[in-house]
Structures are given as structure tokens and as C-alpha cells.
Amino acid sequence: MGSYAVEAHNLRKIFRTREGGILFRGKQREIVAVNDVSFHINFGEIFGLLGPNGAGKTTTIKILSTLLLPDSGEAWVNGFNVVTEAKMVRESIGVSLYSDRGFYWKLTGRENLMYFARLYHLQRDYAEKRINELFNMLDLAGDANRLVEEYSTGMKSKLNIARALLHDPPILFLDEPTIGLDPNSARKVREVVLELKKQGKTILLTTHNMFEAEYLSDRVAIINKGRIIAIGTPRELKEKVSGKRVVELEVSGNYRKLEAGLKGIGGVEAVSLQENNGSGYTSLIRIIYSGDEVLDRIIAMLANSDVKIRSLRNLEPTLEDVFVYYTGERLAEKS
Amino acid sequence: MCTIRVRDLQKKARFPIFSLALGILAKELKIMSRYIGSLLLVLFMPFGVSGLYLGVGYALAGEKSFSNFQANTGVATPLAYFVVGGVLMIASMVMIENASSIIREEQLIGTFELHYLTPNSPVLTWMLHAFAWSILMVIVFAIDISIVLATSIVGYDYLTVGMIFVVVFIGLIPLAGLGLVIAALTIRFKEVYAVSSTINAFISMLSGFYYPLEIFPRIVQAVAQLLPTTHVSIITKTLIGASSGQLSVGDRILVMVLLAFLYLTFGKTIYQRWENEARKRGELSKY
């Protein structure tokens, strides 16, 4: 093992939790967080792990970064086993786990990075040079000496990436690096990720943002309920729904009782629903189908119900449709 | 095996443990200096508590309180006795809570598990935090004891004062072992103060910070000998002439070193056991 930057074989992790109870803890429940997950990442590749919240993305990253022991299965990072060679794995990786946590608020950005540089045993001169380099790369040079408690979410997210890069590791794990960021900050973070790829870094990126996964990743694994359900380049994944048509209908009224009927129409391959805008008045129905007359039958069914069609759009298949195709659920809805 | 090593490994410090220790010390000093109120509280608390005890003594025995105290305990300088005891009590409380409260705080701000991503032993990392705090506590002690000595009628030489600092430092280190045990419980149960306050209450009661241990039955005195703080308390007070002990200072230092070894080994074993469990259960990430 070890010909890939990251290699995971049949990883499985179950969390045991207890529900209810006041003085005494309640009934034990098992949550399968990661179930038989296998994949590999080539050196120099950006690999996206795309899935909704609770799909198992962070658990996978935590196993690969040695924070969590798998119940079964094996994994190697930079050729080192994540359980038996944990120290070497930690030397090989940089990890960004949160976008806005993980700092000492009463220290400046520079002091925070210097502390972590010490934890990575970097020489002081080299650490100072490296910190300046990273602040420049991430457009944080002007704020380096401000206390972190004064940083915006976007600045903290960039500082998180800077910390992950301090010891110049060949492999980076970025867990939802743009979550909660405004569009400009998110764009800057994506630019940085692409720049790091140019520098030869291998990047494992988790996201529930399909645009981000498609834009950044050389290959994507779609993960849901702890299982990887599809893996390939964005193009390869979309080809799985090529030849199929996608329509998005905005409707009002009680759609839920029609859901089974729509799924029963011949040619309809997947149906998903997203409650729209939180208003409760309209819903977005995304339907993947094949065949010329299927859309007519869909519209006829809706027209004969108390559901009103507000708008209808034909769409090009996206990774969202790959997710819908495999799970029957919308990624956006679940996230 | 195909691996790409970290590019700048050659830029690593020659002595990693010093790099780690310096980083932790600098961080804790900076953070403490930015919460100056806490520092001042630790600095002045011993005087406040000593004043309280003197007041209670005066209320009970009036003008005879000092002479009664001397007759019952053999101690001629109650103020020095109380302040030294107070400093030791505050320092021991801080040390016992240190590892666990730092871990709890780091859990809350999200830096805790980041330490597990660095190539350091977590036990060593938390021990060095305790080490940094013991240095800070010695500094606090130095300030407080200087005030006491400056206002005392008894003369002291620099060697005695230096020895006191060394004794306090050695005496605080084993408490980090107890701190690690509480830290282990913190990782699992997230409740620092319930455990640490209970332990602190026992240590405060049995260490003789404010009274000689001879007031207790022999069995309690024997148990008290297992606490490093008991020995620190006796040595310090003996050195400033506020008390006299049965064992020699050298013997007591030897006992303290032995206790340090035992406490730290115990703390390390318990912590590593819980840590391993936490890595299985995913507790490292919970807060």
C-alpha cells in the first residue's frame, strides 16, 4: 500500500449514542457514520467528497487524519497507515477542520500561527518567513497583528487554511472550507485551493456545495448515509445521467400526496422535492426522466390535482442530479 | 513505498521538545497577560484569605489570638504562615485545575483536537502546559513572598528564598499528574469543576496550608504525607522559620520527587487510557 496519496479500504465507523433519560441515560442507539468506504486519491489531485450534512464526510476526514480510530477497514496517507503510523501521517498532512473555530481569540493571527509553527517544531526564522508568505498568499498581511477576536468569518477561514499549510505538507484535508462565507471570501478560498494544486499539493476537500465540488475537483465521490454511492470525474458522474432529461417545476399546493404517483409514471427515474424559500407556499420538484412523452404525463398529473404549476425549467444535468438519481433526495434539501 | 515527505523537514528545530515548550510558555504568558484581572486575582487572593483567617482568629480570641496561635502551633509569625499557606493553596488549586480547564477551554474554542494533528505526544503537550503554569505560579509566589519577607521582622538570605522557589516548583509538578486524571475525566464527561473542586477541597484540608497537621488524628496525618502539597507547605514554612518539621528538608524533597514520579505516572496512564477510548468514541471532537 502507499502508491496513492490517500488510500481507504472498507472503512467503517459506528457511533453509539444514548437517547433520552434524565438521571439515567436512555436507550442506546447505533449510528453508522461511515459504512464500507473505499477510495483512493492520486498525488497532485483535488478530490471532492460531496454529500449532505451527516453523510460521513467529516468522519472520513477524521479517520484519515488520525483523530478517530476506524472500527474496521484500513487507510494509508502518504504511504503511512493511519492507525499504526499516526505520527508520520500527521507530519504529512495539513488539516482545516472548521471555518471559524480553532484559534486563541486573545492572540493575534500571527501569534496563533507562530504557536502552531512551534507545535510543528519549525525553526523560528523559517516559521516567521513562512507565516509572512502565507499571510501574503491569503491576503491577510494587513491583519496579521490584529487579535483573532476581531477577525471576520472569512478571515478566520483563511487563517485556518494558513495554519494547515504552516509545515508545508504535501497533502491537505479541507473540511467544508467555504461554509458560512460570503461569495467574495468563498471565491478567494477557491482560488487558493486551485493555487495549492498548482504547487503540487494533494487535496481532499469535503463540501455539500455541488458547484464547488464540480469547479474544484479532479474527481468527486458522492457520499450519502455513510456510503460512497458514486465516484469519478465530474464529467464521468454526469454521464451517468446523460441521455436523461431534467426538469424543475415550481409548484404550490400539497405536492406530497402526488409524490408516489409521479414516481410511478413510466420513464420517471428520480423525483426530489425542496421546500422553497421557507415560505411554505411553493416547492421545487426536480424530476429526472427519459422519453419524449413523459413530461406531458407529469404535467397532466399535476394539472389534474390541486397543485398549481408556477414555473417549469428544463435543465442540464448537474452533480445534483447525479445525487438525486442515486438517492432520490436533493442534496440542497438535505444540507 | 511511494511517499512524498514534507518539503521543509530540514527547517525543523533541532530540539523539538524545546520548540514545543517555548511555544506553550509563550502562548500561556501572552494569554494570561491579556486577562490581567485573573492574574491580579491570583496575586492578591492569598492576602485576602489570610486577612480573613486573622480576622476570624481575632474575633474568637481577641488580642490573645496571636499568642494563642503560637502556644498551640509553635508558630511565631502567623501572617507569614497564612500568606505562604494561601499562596500554596491557590497555586495548588490552579495546578490541579490547569490541565483540565485548559483542555475544556480548548475543546470549546476548537483548538483541542488540533493538538492531536501535530506530531507531539498529547500527554507531553498538556504536561508542558502545566509546566508553563507552574513557572507562572512560582513568579506569583515570588511576588507574594517578597511582600511578606519585606514586611517581616526576620531576616532571610537569598539562598533560602531561592530554595523556597525550587521547592514550590517541585511540589507543583506532581499536581499536574492529578490534573491529568481530571483532564481524562474532562474529555469524557466535560465537567471540570465538579471533580477538581472535590479534589481541591481534600488537598486544601489535608495539606496544612493554614494550620499544622498535628491537629488531626495520626491516620489523617499519614494520609496527608501522600500529598506533595503537605511537604511543600512544611518545607516552605520551615525555611522562613514559621514552623518546624520532623523530617529534614532534604528528606522531604526526596519524598516530593518520588511523589512527583508516582503522580505523573498515574496521571499519564489514566489519561492515555481515556484518550484511546476517546479516539474510538469520537469524544475528541465533542464539546
Image: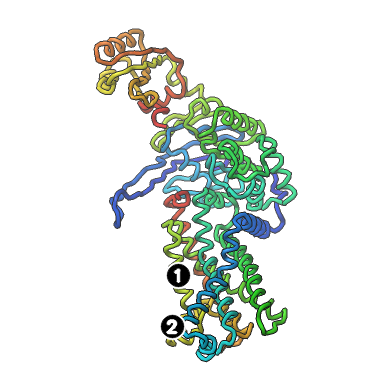
User: Which residue is at the front of the view, A19 or B198?
Assistant: B198
Where is residue B241? Give x, y as percent: 62, 85
| Quadrant in the picture for residue B133 | bottom right
User: Which residue is at the front of the view, A328 or A275?
Assistant: A275
What distance separates the C-alpha of mark 2 from that of mark 1? Answer: 16 Å
Q: Is residue A119 above or below residue A44?
A: below
Read off the chain for label 2: B
Question: Looking at the rendered structure, which numbered label has been put on residue B166?
Answer: none
Q: Residue furthest front?
A: B63
Q: Is residue A124 above or below residue A226?
A: below
Q: Are marks 2 and 1 in contact (CB under 8 Å)?
A: no
Residue drawn at x 44%, y 29% is: A230
Q: Is residue B13 above or below residue A219?
A: below
Read off the chain for label 1: B
Q: Is residue B193 visible?
A: yes
- In the rendered image, which residue does mark 2 sit on? B220
| Circle nearer the N terminus (2, 1) | 1
Element on which disc 1 rests: helix
User: Which residue is at the front of the view, B103 or B52?
Assistant: B52
Left-right relation of B140 to B176: right
Q: Is residue B249 visible?
A: no
| Quadrant in the picture for residue A155 | top right
Where is residue A259? Give x, y as percent: 28, 21
- In the rendered image, which residue does mark 1 sit on? B199
Where is residue B160? Give x, y as percent: 68, 81
Element on which disc 2 rests: helix
Residue drawn at x 64%, y 47% is: A108
Residue type at mark 2? Answer: Val
Residue type at mark 1? Answer: Ile
